[in-house]
Image: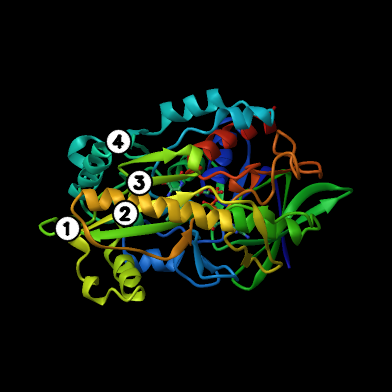
């Protein structure tokens, strides 16, 4: 066991949107910050190989739930899942956050000044997304362009690399904030897997982590756990905070596919437009899947004649707000099944998507697997955290998707960036 006796003001565990924001803001406030990140910091190349390495390893970044086949993806690298995300920016549900004593309106506005957030220019919207939008509007859906975290002047239309990580720097990711933090003096240690928090008299004083088969202890005034909706509860459990990791959400989704003769749609920027069916509890958006993922889904659904038809396929994603439930196990696996209500929402969404695709002229419509990509609510505000994101132990905070207090059903990144800013203000006094 090695002990690193440096005096950090704050240790941040995890460098996804939550952790990266806290680190960046604390550096701007002249704190000494250490970021510990399990994944690597390899430059983003936009390759399938890199994607599989960081987000496709079974048991690590691809997790399977115990009941019914549902796959969950997370990114293990600097920037976390945001490196592979679809870059859609949704405002937080302010009323819900206010009801927990959390007003993040100013922080959201601040993020919007610093990060590119705007709907895509028409010329960056692919033919498939346009076709879906026209069909949906024709049927009376309120199908609108979605705000994107994209530097549109750098975006290469139809390059198809968005989901593998943008190599052109067009997609804003949490790695941008990590880079600002390290340029400002933060230390980033990669391949450092935090196992537990160190306490003294009920007060967090540091963490233990493993790197290359060796264990290390590091110490700081404050510790912020931001290892994501699955990673953070695992660390808290192993540190004696046993209520972490229960009754969570993961925003399940399905893809709906249909082919249109004559369409030439490859590598479109995903989630250009869609509709939030708030009352029914789900959202529908265009989402052009990368070729290998499309091929695997169509083959596994026995649509073998469609495996090579990606360029003529229209794709709609249905993402629901699921019921809270399940548990994260001691070793970080996910036990949660879809409820009857969840299935009803997915089926309802599927019916609407089918209608839109049919109206657009699509044939051979089918649905893909159940997938989830937003695990959260595992260390909720008002349950394990106060409204300053502090745990019952002094000097210990959590800032990532785990903290969300209720079922969500929306892309959470903008909310997490705002919460990160708010927490950094609180910590630095
Ligand atoms: C395919 C996909 C598409 C998405 N699209 C969108 C979108 O369009 N818009 C949107 O808002 N959201 C989207 N999301 C969700 C969004 O990316 C996540 O909600 C967000 O990244 C969560 O941030 P976080 O800080 O909670 O955790 P994460 O991003 O999961 O980051 C946690 C970090 O902690 C690290 N870590 C974990 N355990 C440890 C440990 N023990 N020690 C040290 N480090 C650890 C991980 O390696 C990771 O870097 C998408 C997600 C996926 C997977």
Tell me, yes or no, whether the two marked residues, 1 and 4, touch with CB atoms within 8 Å: no
Mark 1 burial class by Cα count in 10 Å: few <14, some 14-19, many 20+ = some
Label 3: which residue?
A: 285
- Position of residue 378 measured from the top left corner of the image (x, y, whole percent): 66, 52
Pick whichever, 103 or 355, lies toward us.
Answer: 355
Q: In the rendered view, does 412 fall on the left or right side of 315?
A: right
Circle nearer the N terminus (4, 3)? 4
Label 1: which residue?
A: 260
Label 4: which residue?
A: 140
Query: For numbered disc 4, what is the local secondary structure?
Result: loop
Pick whichever, 393 or 272, lies toward us.
Answer: 272
For residue 114, say whether it is visible: yes
Circle nearer the N terminus (3, 1)? 1
For residue 166, say whether it is visible: no
**Which part of the image, by quadrant, shows the C terminus?**
top right
Q: CA distance from mark 3 to mark 1?
A: 18 Å
Circle nearer the N terminus (2, 1)? 1
Q: Which residue: 30% across, 38% down?
A: 151
* Up-down relation of residue 69 to residue 377 (above or below): below
Q: CA distance from mark 2 to mark 4?
A: 15 Å
**Residue 110, labelled with which disc?**
none
Circle nearer the N terminus (2, 3)? 3
Query: For numbered disc 1, what is the local secondary structure?
Result: loop
**Which part of the image, by quadrant, shows the N terminus?**
bottom right
- Position of residue 267 measured from the top left corner of the image (x, y, whole percent): 23, 55
Q: CA distance from mark 1 to mark 4?
A: 21 Å
Label 2: which residue?
A: 354
Mark 4 burial class by Cα count in 10 Å: few <14, some 14-19, many 20+ = few
């Amino acid at each position: 066991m090695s002990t690193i006796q440096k005096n950090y003001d704050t240790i941040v565990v995890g460098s996804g949107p939550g952790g990266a924001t806290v680190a960046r803001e604390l550096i701007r406030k002249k704190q000494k910050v250490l970021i510990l990140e399990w994944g690597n910091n390899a430059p983003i190349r936009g390759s399938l190989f890199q994607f599989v390495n960081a987000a496709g390893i079974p048991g690590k970044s691809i997790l399977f739930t115990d009941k019914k086949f549902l796959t969950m993806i997370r990114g293990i690298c600097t920037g976390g899942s945001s490196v592979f995300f679809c870059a859609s920016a949704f405002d937080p549900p302010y009323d819900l956050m206010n009801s927990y004593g959390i007003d993040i309106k100013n922080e959201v506005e601040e993020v919007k000044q610093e990060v590119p957030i705007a709907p895509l220019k028409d010329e960056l919207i692919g033919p498939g997304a346009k076709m879906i939008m026209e069909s949906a509007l024709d049927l009376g859906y309120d199908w609108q362009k979605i705000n994107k975290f994209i530097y549109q002047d750098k975006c290469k239309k139809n390059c198809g690399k968005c989901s593998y990580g943008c190599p052109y720097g067009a997609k804003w990711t949490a790695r941008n904030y990590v880079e600002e933090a390290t340029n400002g003096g933060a230390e980033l240690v990669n391949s450092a897997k935090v196992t537990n928090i160190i306490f003294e008299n009920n007060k967090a004083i540091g963490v233990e982590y493993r790197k290359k088969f060796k264990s290390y202890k590091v110490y700081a005034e404050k510790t912020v756990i931001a290892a994501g909706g699955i990673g953070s509860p695992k660390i808290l459990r192993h540190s004696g905070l046993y209520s972490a990791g229960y009754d969570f959400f993961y925003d399940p989704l399905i893809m709906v596919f249909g082919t249109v003769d004559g369409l030439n749609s490859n590598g479109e920027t995903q989630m250009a437009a869609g509709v939030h069916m708030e009352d029914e509890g789900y959202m529908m958006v265009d989402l052009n899947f990368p070729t290998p993922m499309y091929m695997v889904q169509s083959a596994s659904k026995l649509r073998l004649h469609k495996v090579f038809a990606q360029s003529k396929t229209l794709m709609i994603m249905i993402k629901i707000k699921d019921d809270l439930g399940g548990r994260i196990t001691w070793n970080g696996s996910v036990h949660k099944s879809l409820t009857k209500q969840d299935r009803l929402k997915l089926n309802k969404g599927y019916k609407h998507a089918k209608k839109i695709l049919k109206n657009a002229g699509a044939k051979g419509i089918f649905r893909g697997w159940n997938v989830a990509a937003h695990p959260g609510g595992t260390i909720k505000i008002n349950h394990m955290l106060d409204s300053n994101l502090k745990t019952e132990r002094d000097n210990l905070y959590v800032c990532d998707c785990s903290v969300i207090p209720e079922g969500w059903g929306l892309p959470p990144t903008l909310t997490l960036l705002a919460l990160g800013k708010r927490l950094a203000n609180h910590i630095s006094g």
